[in-house]
Image (cartoon, rainbow, N blue to C red):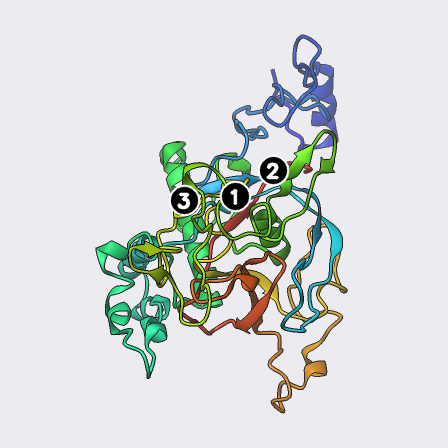
């Protein structure tokens, strides 16, 4: 019996058709085909899937695999913007209603141990120049009028700081880390799925650090920096304020309920809910009863997580996001998955950066969340600041995000 192959001539097609089409994608029992259960044959042509000698291959799919350290953030409608008094008089994040699609986000900030692991593998398989470009700037701790030398020498590499957030990294370095992490995680998933073994059996070229086909069904989308809208939505975590059907009892000034900065409940009554600067010269309180327990950064799992299960979405370190900064981003936006990639509709020429009349250009990126050195004002999710993408400080780190692929919400 001659096999039906779609790219043969018309007479071959006629022969194939007269031999009778296969099950036409029937699922048995009358069910409809789905992504995870597509059936044995196409519902469009009736051709059998996964036949040898040129048949269309439909791999098993059980949903997007779970990536390390990621938390699922269910999307929905929200009101973005600052609810704080605009003490900086920036007027750059007015309230507006948007919808954010579901995505994933790291439950913690990327820590020193994660960056040291990155440096280890970069040293093994990259040029010396790239390795040096990946090194954090540890001199961000240095101050002319402060004795921060121990942090310069020890913060990144001393084992006691392993699970403290990495700092001294630029926006560009964070982007490179996301790319490396995507490759490494997907290669591990490929090995666990036997992808390399199957390629060897088929005597085909083995995949390297390049793209593993999305059609395989076992790879993850790329890790990346979250958009500003995603970050702000995840920090609000208003999933915890729902009541009955599509009703929210209240909004939030911080990633937790209320206007207070201390825990109002149980055994942790009176303890601070984030690592921040309480006031001029007060980073941690007095000996014997330190108020937030950290004079600089702190353990990435310190303080209660928000209702999405994310730690330190306020305080500890500010976090890089994808967006280019513009003061009118709230005005020039799409209301579904908003992001500002560049100067579209608000070109940098209008800010006179070249003549030093503004700091705004297409290379300044937004950072969010407040840090160990910031007062409480900056811990409100709607506040925003910006810095050159190739600059680094001791108060800015980051966490990764990832799309939820193959869904409509």
| Position of residue 195 measured from the top left corner of the image (x, y, whole percent) | 41, 35
Residue 295, x across and y down, in percent? 35, 63
Q: Quadrant of residue 17?
A: top right
Dot 2 crowding, Cα within 10 Å, few <14, some 14–19, many 20+ = some
* Badge 1 vs badge 2, beta-carbon distance below 8 Å: yes
Residue at the disc numbered 2: 240
Q: Which residue corresponds to mark 3?
A: 185
Circles 2 and 3 in contact, beta carbons < 8 Å: no
Mark positioned earlier in the residue sequence (1 or 2): 2
Q: Nearer the viewer, residue 202 or 31?
A: 31
Q: Can you say whether 356 is above or below 200 in the image?
A: below
Q: Residue furthest top?
A: 29
- Per the image, label 1 sits on a secondary structure element best described as loop
Left or right of residue 276: residue 321: right
Identify which residue, 280 or 137, lies in the foreground: 280
Residue where numbered disc 1 is placed: 306
Q: Residues within 10 Å of mark 3 (few under 14, many from 20)?
A: some
Residue 335 visible in rendering: no
What is the spatial separation of the Cα atoms under label 2 and label 3, in whole angstroms? Answer: 31 Å
Give the mark toward the camera: 1 or 3: 1
Residue 75 vs 331, above or below: the answer is above
In the image, 327 versus 118, the foreground residue is 327
The quadrant of the image that shows the C terminus is top right
Kindly indicate the quadrant of the structure image that contains residue 240. top right
- Circle nearer the N terminus (1, 3): 3
């Amino acid at each position: 019996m001659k096999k039906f192959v779609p790219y043969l001539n018309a007479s071959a097609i006629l022969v194939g058709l007269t031999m009778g089409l296969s099950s036409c994608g029937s699922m048995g029992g009358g069910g409809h085909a789905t992504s995870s259960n597509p059936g044995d044959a196409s519902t469009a042509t009736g051709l059998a899937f996964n036949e040898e000698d040129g048949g269309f291959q439909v791999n098993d799919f059980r949903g997007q695999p779970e990536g390390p350290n990621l938390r699922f953030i269910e999307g929905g409608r929200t009101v973005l913007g600052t609810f704080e008094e605009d003490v900086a008089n920036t007027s750059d994040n007015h309230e507006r209603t948007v919808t954010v699609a579901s995505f994933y986000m790291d439950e913690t900030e990327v820590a020193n141990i994660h960056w040291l692991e990155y440096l280890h593998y970069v040293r093994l398989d990259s040029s010396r120049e790239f390795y040096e470009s990946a090194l954090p700037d540890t001199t961000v701790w240095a101050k002319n009028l402060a004795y921060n030398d121990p942090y310069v020498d020890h913060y990144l590499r001393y084992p006691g700081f392993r699970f403290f957030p990495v700092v001294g990294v630029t926006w560009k370095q964070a982007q490179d880390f996301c790319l490396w992490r995507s490759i490494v995680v997907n290669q591990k998933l490929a090995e666990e799925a036997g992808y390399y073994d199957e390629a060897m059996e088929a005597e085909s070229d083995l995949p390297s650090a390049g793209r593993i086909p999305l059609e395989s069904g076992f790879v993850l989308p790329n890790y990346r920096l979250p958009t500003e809208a995603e970050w702000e939505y995840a920090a609000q975590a208003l999933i915890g304020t729902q009541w009955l059907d599509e009703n929210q009892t209240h909004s939030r000034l911080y990633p937790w309920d209320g206007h207070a900065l201390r825990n109002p409940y149980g055994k942790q009554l009176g303890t601070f809910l984030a690592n921040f600067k309480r006031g001029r010269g007060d980073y941690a309180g007095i000996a014997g009863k330190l108020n937030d327990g950290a004079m600089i950064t702190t353990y990435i799992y310190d303080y209660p997580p928000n209702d999405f299960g994310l730690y330190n979405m306020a305080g500890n370190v500010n976090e890089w996001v994808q967006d280019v900064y513009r003061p009118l981003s709230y005005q020039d936006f799409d209301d579904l998955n908003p992001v500002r990639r560049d100067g579209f509709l608000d070109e940098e020429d209008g800010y006179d950066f070249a003549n030093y009349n503004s700091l705004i250009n297409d290379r300044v990126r937004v950072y969010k969340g407040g840090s160990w050195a910031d007062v409480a004002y900056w811990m409100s999710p709607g506040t925003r600041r910006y810095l050159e993408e190739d600059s680094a400080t001791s108060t800015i780190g980051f966490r990764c995000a990832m799309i939820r692929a193959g869904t409509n919400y």
